[in-house]
Structures are given as structure tokens and as C-alpha cells.
Amino acid sequence: MMKNLIKNCLFFVFSSLWAAPEPVLNFKVAQESFKVEKLTDGHGIIWGMDFLTKDLLLFTEKNGQISVLDLKKETVRNLKNLPKVYDSGQGGLLDIAVDPNFSQNSFVYVTYSKRIENKQTTAMARARLDLKKEEFDQWEDLFIAKPTLSTTHHYGSRIAFDPKGYIFLSVGERGSANLAQSLEAHMGKIIRLKMDGSIPQDNPFYNNPKALKEIWSYGHRNPQGLFFDKKSNILYEQEHGPMGGDEINIIKKGLNYGWPVITYGVDYSGKPIGKGETHSEGMEQPIKYFKPSIAPSSLLVYRNGMLGFFNDKFVSAALALQHMNAVAIKDSLKACEDRFLEKLNERFRDVIQGPDGYLYISSDNGRIYRIKENNL
């Protein structure tokens, strides 16, 4: 009996080792050692990710597919009954977020580029997910940004929940920079809604007849990072600058973040934008700006995780310079960047912290990676 027990235990150990994803890279940051595991491959641009359970990871592909990665079974299942998206330029199926009360209501939220009468805009929809049937049901648009435009870039767009039952989403200015300063357009804004898409009456411009009631903050360029930090009760946003001037901001009710009046970047021609100013009265300063640009595509505040080095740091994915980025939250303006994963030579699109405390990263090459400590 004892021999069988030992044999079964050894089988379990070796089976577990056999099933574990192979590390594709070992790296060090500040003398701490980590390993990178590839969890899935062969997909389109993986734009957004969120966990359903500790073992089930939802992810979107820009081309319109939503899938679930089972970390335990090491399988990927494509889900059915998907929203109709406009996949062109920078648009397509974008972010995905699981309702904090998913176990009770089965709701999943997505942002996407929506085609309306030969123009397009940023939209947010939700539906119920039936995991047994592997399909969505009852799709409903909760928000459609105004106006629609013919351009196919700078959609935003990320989703964040706060603990009070509100949902925030970011909308890019779609290449029409001046719309970021207009309260009559959703472009270049952070939007705040109730979970059912209705508008909170305490939104800053709710009683302004010349403003759109959904607006929470304005003066943004192309915000592709949005994260509500429950420890500090702060909403952080990260946006693309032009040539230089990517920003991390603390988002506060009703404030103006300056684009395109102030910026730490310049036009792609090398000429100043506007008057070339970085400060103006009534406009907020970033808590961190990047010069040259890193083209940030996601933002995470890493808290109480398994990877000690990253605790209390901003972690963001970078597209143009093809690396991951970490910056200390404390005194972030002066804090140095720590860059990693450059050797993978990929455009990193999203980064989230898993229930297990590890980092999960997606790329435009259709891969999802997990970063763990390297104890070898």
C-alpha cells in the first residue's frame, strides 16, 4: 500500500512538472530574477484580458474574437455570439472587464469600435456569459461616444471599476485634438457611468446644459491605460503623447489634463504643438511623463503580489519600444524606469495582475505570457 502511495505521489509530481509551461526567458531587474512562461500562442492582437476565476482568463482579439484560456487544463476555447466590431486601423474589439459581481449576474463588459453610417466611434457594451454553453447572450450597448468620425485611430480605450459601483472608461480624441477640450464631445475624455450605463447625477458636468453628462475628466489624447487602485482609492490614467510626452495622471472629478494646449511632446514633424507650452493655469500636470515616448498601451498598479520587486509600482506595456516598464509610484516624476522583456522583441498590449499574484502580459503577436519568480 505504501509503495502504491509513493508511486501515485511521484506520478502526480511528474505530471505537474510535465504540464507546466516552459520558460521562454529568464531575466533580472535590480538583481531580482524572474522567468517568463508562454501560456498561449497563435492568436491575433490580444488587446484586453481579465480573469473570470483563478484558472479562467478571458481575452479579446482585435479582430473580434473573445476566448477563454483555462490555465489548469491548458486549453483555449473560442466563445460564441460576439459583438459586431469594426476592425480597421487601431479599431476593433478592444478591452474586456469582468463584472465584480460576475458570480451573481454573469456580466462581462467590452469596449470596441462601432460603425455607424460609414463612420465609427468608441462604444462600450455588456452581455451575460454562459460558460457551460460557451456563449454570450443579451448584448447591450451602454455607451456610444459622440460624435462619430471617419478616422480609424485613437479610440482609447480601457475599463476600470471602483468599489462604489461605478465604471470608468477612456475615450481617445480620434486624431481630432481640439475635441479633447470640448465638453460637447466624448473624445479625449474619461467617462463615468453606473454599472447599468446610466449617468450618475454627481458627475461634474451633469447640470451643465452645454456639456455631455457622462464626462468625468477631459483634455486627454489617447488614453490606453486606466486603473483604479483600491489601496489608495485613486484612479490612474496613462495616455499616448505625440512625439514624446506620454503621461501618467491622477484622474480627479471635472479636471482638465491639457491636451492639446499643453504637452511635453512635439508634433511628428518636430514642430511645437500649439504654443509649445508644458504648463497653463487650470490644467493638470502629469505625475510622470516619458520623453522619448514608450507608446504605453496599458497600466497596472501592482500591489501585494508574489513578485516583490514590482510591489507598489506602476507596470505598463509598451508598443513602440517593445518592452515592459516599471516605475515606483512614490515620487513617480523623478523615479527611474526599469525596462524588461526587450529580448522578446514584441509589442506588448496589456498587462494585468492575476489572482495568483503574478503578472500576465499579452502581445500583438498573439501571445500571453506569465511572469513568475525564478527560484533556480
Image: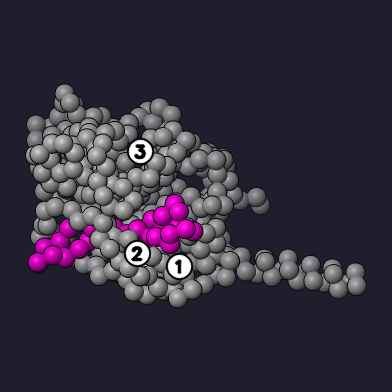
Q: Is mark 1 on a helix, strand or loop?
A: strand
The residue closer to the viewer here, 346 or 248, is 248
Q: What element carries label 2?
A: strand
* Magenta: main secondary structure: strand
- Classify mark 1: residues with Cα within 10 Å, few (<14), some (14-19) or many (20+): many
The residue closer to the viewer here, 361 or 133, is 133
Q: Which amino acid, by three-letter code, is at mark 2? A: Ala
Pointer 1 residue: 68
Name which quarter of the figure residue 244 lies in: top left
Q: Is residue 78 visible?
A: yes
- Classify mark 2: residues with Cα within 10 Å, few (<14), some (14-19) or many (20+): many
Cβ atoms at labels 2 and 1 below 8 Å apart: no
Q: In this rendering, which labeled residue sits more in front, label 2 or label 1?
A: 2
Q: Position of residue 273 (x, y in %)?
A: 11, 38
Question: In the rendered view, would you say 267 is above or below 96?
Answer: above
321 is within the stretch colored magenta: no
Name which of mark 1 and mark 3 comes first in the sequence. Answer: 1
Q: In this rendering, which labeled residue sits more in front, label 2 or label 3?
A: 2
- Classify mark 3: residues with Cα within 10 Å, few (<14), some (14-19) or many (20+): some
Cα–Cα gap, marks 2 and 3 = 25 Å
Residue at 32% over, 38% down: 248
Q: Is mark 3 on a helix, strand or loop?
A: strand
Pointer 3 residue: 235
Q: What stretch is highlighted in magenta?
A: 97-123
Cβ atoms at labels 1 and 3 below 8 Å apart: no
107 is within the stretch colored magenta: yes
Residue at 9% over, 35% down: 274
Q: Where is residue 92 in the image (x, y as percent from the top left)?
A: 25, 64
Name which quarter of the figure residue 259 lies in: top left
Left or right placement of residue 75 versus residue 322 in this view:
right
Cα–Cα gap, marks 1 and 3 = 28 Å
Label of residue 127 in the image: 2
